[in-house]
Every structure is written in C-alpha cells, then in structure tokens.
C-alpha cells in the first residue's frame, strides 16, 4: 500500500472513537433506484448482450432517426436512492449517528429503505421518487419520476416532521448536509425556511458546518443558479459552508457566473471560490478531485476502477468521504484522498464500505 494511504488510514483508525460521538443530518430528497442494463441482443439460448457504452446506446438511437424503438432492460439492483439517503447511509457505515429527512414513504415507510445502516435515522414526509438508472461502462442515464417530491414544500415538511423536531435534529448535529437542489422543486424554499426559522433559534450558540451539493443543474437557467449561489453566500455569512460539484456541474455553475467558457478546472474553481466566499469549494472528476480552502488549493488523484459494480451513487459516496474527513478534522489533502478512496470502494464492490472494508480495499490496491 502507498505511504500516503497508510498514513491516512492510520490517522483515521486513531480518530475513529471520535466519530461515534458525532451526529450528521442530511436532506431533503429520497428515491427508489432501479439500476438497469439495456439489452442490445439476445442469443438463441436467451443470453443477453448489453449496450456497453453511452456512445453505443446513443448511436443506436440516433441511427433509427424516425419511428418507434422498443428496448428491453434488466434490473440488476433495487435500492435506496437520492443524494440524502445514499450520503447518510455511507456516513453511517463509519458508526456516525446520521439523521436523514426526506421522502421514504408516507404515512408508512417503503420497505426498500428498511435495510439501511442501523445508525441512520429516517424522518419521512412524502413518498419517494422513482429513478430508472440505465448504467453503462462509462456513464449512466437517470430517468426520474418525482411523484410526491414535486409537492414537498417547506410548509409540508414542517407539518409532517415538525418544526421543533427539525430544530432539535439540526441543533444536535455536527454537520448539516443540504443536497439535491436541482431535482427537488421546492429546495430553494426549503433552504430559505431553514435560514428563516431554524438557524435563528440555534444561533448564536452554535456556528454550523454545512455541506451543499447542487446535483445536475443542467435543466436550470443561469438566473436560477445565480439566485441559489447568493443563497449559499447568505449561509456562509455566519456558517462554515462547503460546496461540492462534479465537473459537469462546475462548468454549468461557472457559465452562470461568466459566459466565457473555461475548461481548466483550476482556473474555473479558483474563480468560483473567489466569488462565492465560502469556506471550501470541491470539484470532483473521474480522474482527480480538487479543493479550495482559505488561500490554498489542493488536488488528489482518484483510483481507477475497471468494470465497476455500480455507478449510481459514486458522487454521494465521495461527498460522504469528504464529510467524514471534515468531522475528523483531517488536512484537506487527506480529506480529498479519503473521499476518492470511499467512492472507489463503492464503485468496486457496489456498496458503501465500512472502515474495515475500506482498509481491505486499500490493501488490494497495492
């Protein structure tokens, strides 16, 4: 095992007892993920040949040009989905008590969520969305049915969870993760409600650690994105704010601020970080992850995984790793490395690793 991994894992091992006393809250989405492969051909023996790459799939559709197309998919996995529950479950795998406020079934919990880590406490206000995730070797296509999530307003959440309960959960948490602005219709209103009705009750007794992920914001206009970024700046005025973006999201957000295209992530990230005035900005890509904090910037290479067991949720596991690093007060380089390692372990084995499983995975890397 490389020295930097040995050092990281030993540092985490020594600090693990700290995590059992930590609390995290995530919100406010919730999906059932149906992970699927798309069949290209079937042999006479009924063995399936699948589309391997997104280019293969896209080219097949493009070649048809007109008329109808009938394709068969095979579900390989059905699991809890959404940024909030996947991130919560991955954090809980390290023994951290994690509350997750989202859409997991109402008035009864959907059975798909009952297998989550025991230290994950679910608070549900609606029925979950349904995501059909078509996975290929080099990417995925997410087809989402929002169901009740499109009606999940701040007023509904307060009514079904209780404002006092939300305040209690957030007040006792060491880190608050506000996720998936892009997909949940009333997320901006929900975040405004937290600023207006939750944090004033908690403060000035506590300066909050906040972690944001906007998710794929390609369907939103520049004005909407800028409005949300200004909301993040309002959070950052009194709290420690981290924003995590993948490369596609970072380029879209940058374009909303500056129409001149930039492909260099270091220039792009530095410009956004200067504008946002937040504590930490993170950009993660398949090849490397980058972070800006204070007056410094950091980078860490990712771990290449051939033939990943799953793709959907890798970004959430990266975010979980970064959150765990922040809770452990690791150096930023170590936090990036942990995030990359956790995401790679998830890709390799198809589930969020515990610390022991992460050590085993790191040893296999050599």
Image (tube, helix red, strand yellow):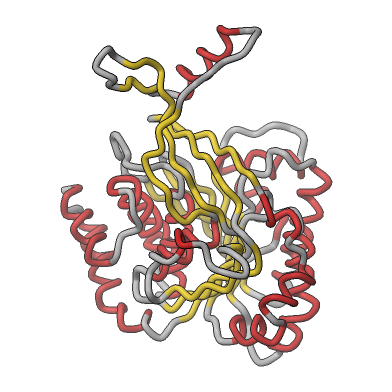
Q: Is residue 74 above or below residue 57?
A: below
Residue 175 or residue 197, whichever sits in front = 197
Name the residue at the bottom extreme.
205
Asked whether, in this view, residue 124 is left or right of residue 116, the answer is right
- Residue 180: x, y in percent? 63, 55
- Residue 210: x, y in percent? 60, 70
Residue 301 or residue 223, whichever sits in front = 223
Residue located at (74% from left, 64% from top): 233
Residue located at (27% from left, 67% from top): 355
Q: Is residue 121 above or below residue 8?
A: below
Q: Is residue 192 above or below residue 55?
A: below
Name the residue at the right extreme.
223
- Residue 184: x, y in percent? 69, 54
Residue located at (40% from left, 76% from top): 119
Residue located at (32% from left, 41% from top): 309
Q: Is residue 64 above or below residue 281?
A: above
Residue 68 or residue 38, whichever sits in front = 68
Asked whether, in this view, residue 320 is left or right of residue 68, the answer is left
Count of marks overlaid on the render: 0
Asked whether, in this view, residue 113 is left or right of residue 150, the answer is left
- Residue 72: x, y in percent? 46, 25
């Amino acid at each position: 095992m490389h020295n930097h991994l040995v050092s990281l894992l030993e540092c985490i091992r020594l600090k693990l007892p700290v995590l059992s006393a930590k609390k995290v809250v995530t919100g406010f989405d919730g999906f059932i993920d149906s992970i699927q492969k798309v069949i290209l051909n079937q042999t006479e023996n009924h063995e399936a040949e699948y589309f391997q790459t997104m280019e293969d799939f896209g080219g097949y559709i493009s070649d048809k040009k007109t008329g109808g197309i009938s394709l068969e998919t095979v579900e390989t996995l059905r699991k809890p989905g959404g940024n909030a529950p996947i991130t919560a479950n991955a954090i809980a795998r390290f023994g951290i008590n994690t509350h997750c406020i989202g859409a997991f079934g109402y008035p009864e919990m959907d059975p798909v969520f009952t297998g989550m880590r025991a230290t994950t406490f679910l608070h549900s206000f609606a029925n979950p969305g349904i995501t059909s995730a078509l996975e290929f070797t080099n990417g995925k296509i997410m087809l989402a049915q929002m169901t009740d999530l499109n009606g999940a307003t701040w007023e509904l959440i307060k009514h079904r969870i209780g404002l006092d309960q939300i305040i209690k959960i957030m007040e006792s948490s060491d880190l608050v993760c506000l996720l998936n602005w892009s997909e949940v219709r009333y997320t901006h209103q929900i975040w405004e409600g937290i600023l207006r009705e939750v944090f004033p009750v908690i403060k000035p007794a506590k300066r909050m650690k906040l972690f944001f992920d906007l998710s794929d914001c390609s369907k939103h206009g520049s004005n909407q994105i800028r409005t949300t970024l200004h909301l993040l700046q309002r959070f950052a005025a009194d709290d420690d704010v981290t924003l995590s973006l993948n490369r596609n999201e970072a380029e879209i957000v940058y374009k909303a601020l500056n129409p001149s295209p930039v492909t260099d992530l270091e220039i792009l990230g530095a410009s956004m970080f200067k504008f946002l005035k937040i504590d930490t900005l993170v950009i993660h890509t398949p090849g490397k992850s980058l972070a800006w904090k204070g007056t410094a910037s950091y980078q860490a290479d990712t771990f290449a995984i051939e033939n990943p067991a799953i793709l959907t949720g890798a970004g959430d596991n990266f975010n979980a790793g970064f959150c765990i690093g922040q809770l452990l007060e690791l150096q930023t380089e170590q936090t990036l490395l942990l995030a990359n390692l956790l995401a790679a372990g998830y890709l390799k084995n198809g589930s969020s690793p515990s610390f022991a499983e992460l050590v085993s995975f790191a040893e296999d890397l050599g």
